[in-house]
Amino acid sequence: MFKKILIANRGEIACRVIKTAKTMGISTVAIFSEQDAMALHVAMADEAVCIGPAPAKESYLKIDNIVAIAKKTCVDAVHPGYGFLSEQSEFATAIEKAGITFIGPSKDAIGAMGDKIRSKKIAEDAGVSTVPGYLGIVKGNTEALKIAEDIGYPLMIKASAGGGGKGMRIAYNSADLSEGFQLAANEALASFGDDRIFLEKYIERPRHIEIQILGDKYGNVIHLGERECSIQRRHQKIIEEAPSAFLGSDTRDEMGAQAVALAKAVQYSSAGTVEFIVDEESNFYFLEMNTRLQVEHPVTEFVTGIDLVEQMIRIATGEKLSLDQEDVKCDGWAIEARVYAEDPTRNFLPSTGRLTQYKEPARSDSIRVDSGVIEGSEISIFYDPLISKLIAYGGSREEAIEKLRKALSVYLVRGIAHNIPFLTAVISNERFADADFSTDFLAEEFPEGFTSEKAVGSRMVVFIAAAAFVRAKQDSRMSHLRSSSYIIQSADPESEKISVKAEVSWDSCNATITVGGSDLSLRSDWTPWSAIFQSNIDGIDHHFILQENKIGMSLTSGIYRADLIILTPSQSRLYGYMPANEAPDLTKYLLAPMPGLLVRLSVNVGDVVKDGDELAVVEAMKMENVLRSERDGTIAKINFVPGDNLEVDQVILEYGE
């Protein structure tokens, strides 16, 4: 067994590998960029070495530097995690040439499957069903348009070296293809150092289902069942589950058999994933093979009880698989939700900043959190916006969903925008509950993005009761009064003012809250000034995330939100005399929607633009974002040039009057 391994990655996957290594008695070495000097994976490892500046191409993608550190620290092996260099055959080759073991498949298998074009040809030869398309490198936009005429729209633009949703676009017409081709190539070059693009037919309303495989160095290959990853946005998976509620046993068995056949065709040894798309008639087609650990691997670990990282390490040492196919048993249901630093109210644009408050749900036998951050960690523009993966396990799909919903309700993230309310909305959706979805689910159910719903009616009464309890608890600490009276209203200036009386004492968990004449019984062991408020109101459990301000508080519970003004009766009378603030007119500016790099300006001063015209392209967290005009007008002033770094809401350009 290895004595020491280096993890050539960062964030939650580096932490994940370190945890298993520790349980196996293996020492670990972390690498980190200057940006990540205070990162959690650095603190968890036994040793840590700086690899270079913040940009990945100057640090985590520097093969020579990683090999040098591996030699210097005298490690036995290197685990690549996922992303970065994990599917680069050149990296595996360099590690092996240094006399160090690569914890993953052979360089030949990585090369064969890492190239999406070559992998499709191998899959066809192995008898695996594949998607129709052009199995060659598309040399430019002109050739792409010509090839598209033969394949037919819609089609998928894909980076040959791509993965994780990077370098992928759907084209429904020639205009989409012309724009998407270059964006996909740029993303692929930035993420993988390879801008080769190919095209294939886009299967409409597909489900994305993948098979987890394990192979050793002696030709033994098994599969560990499937994961469904159909809930995606911009080809990035959001929710994953194991097993799939869609597959019948015959389809499941055939997909598993084809995945094993493909792995054997390339003499695969390690953990890997064969991805398929499945149409509405249960016809399935090979999509790609990921020659690495998948982000969503925890759901498979939950239902099988198999530690995939441990298996990778044991296979790399030369051990034979300890399992035969008939030994693999899948029990229960597991669902994973990816928590991202992004703003659902602003078209899911990446969000950066410091985690000023951060508290994960309590871990248990049925709740797992894989993260690489702690309170105080910084989410930067240089890396993927993934904060963590929250995984729930239950005896049934319904039980797993309910456990995931409860865990999300007490997940506290402050300092940046995040997608936790959106994740709650997804798993609370009726179609999701019925497993009636495809990869188009988010576009169909959330076409305008997502904004938390305002609490109204009886739900608003519950929110007001919770807010009154919190305020009264704080006031009783200072005044020792048992009864407090408030006037509470929504932050909307036209909203109704509601008289509220709270009977609560500092040293009691029980209270009676009278909201507009209706009494509610409330019990909570909340302590000031905690941001998480768990309570039972009239016999029903409620969880809230609180954000207090000078004259009130905002409460979030699941997909619902209430922004409340909480005043004493005398304060309320005076508040009515306060002048209202008018929002500034921002329609004459193009603002940077997120921190990032200005990659391209598409206009000059004096240009006349129409609503929808491209104005600029901003790169953030390895994704290029096209900024379009939201009005007709003339460009009067440009404040930045390509190559400049932007902060959120900086004025990129201005329109004329």
Image (cartoon, helix red, strand yellow):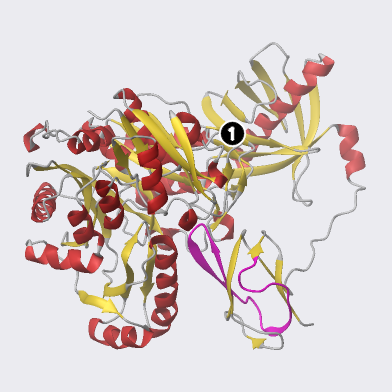
**Magenta region: which residues?**
616-644
What residue is shown at x 33% (from left), y 62% (from top)? 162
- Where is residue 434? Give x, y as percent: 31, 48
Q: Nearer the viewer, residue 319 or 205?
A: 319
Q: Residue 158 sits in which quadrant? A: bottom left
> From where the camera sits, is residue 93 visible?
yes
- Where is residue 376? Give x, y as percent: 61, 36
Relative to 561, is 642 above or below?
below
Relative to 388, is 363 above or below?
above
| Amino acid at circle 1 | Glu
* Quadrant occupied by the N terminus: top left
Q: Is residue 642 magenta?
A: yes
Which class describes the residues within 10 Å of circle 1: few (<14), some (14-19), or many (20+)?
A: some
- Where is residue 54? Give x, y as percent: 54, 51
Residue placed under numbered mark 1 in the picture: 375
What residue is shown at x 32% (from left), y 41% (from top)? 79
What residue is shown at x 25% (from left), y 36% (from top)? 308
Q: Residue 547 sits in which quadrant? A: top right
Q: How many marks?
A: 1
Residue 324 placement, left or right of 297: left
Q: Is residue 636 magenta?
A: yes
Residue 144 placement, left or right of 175: left
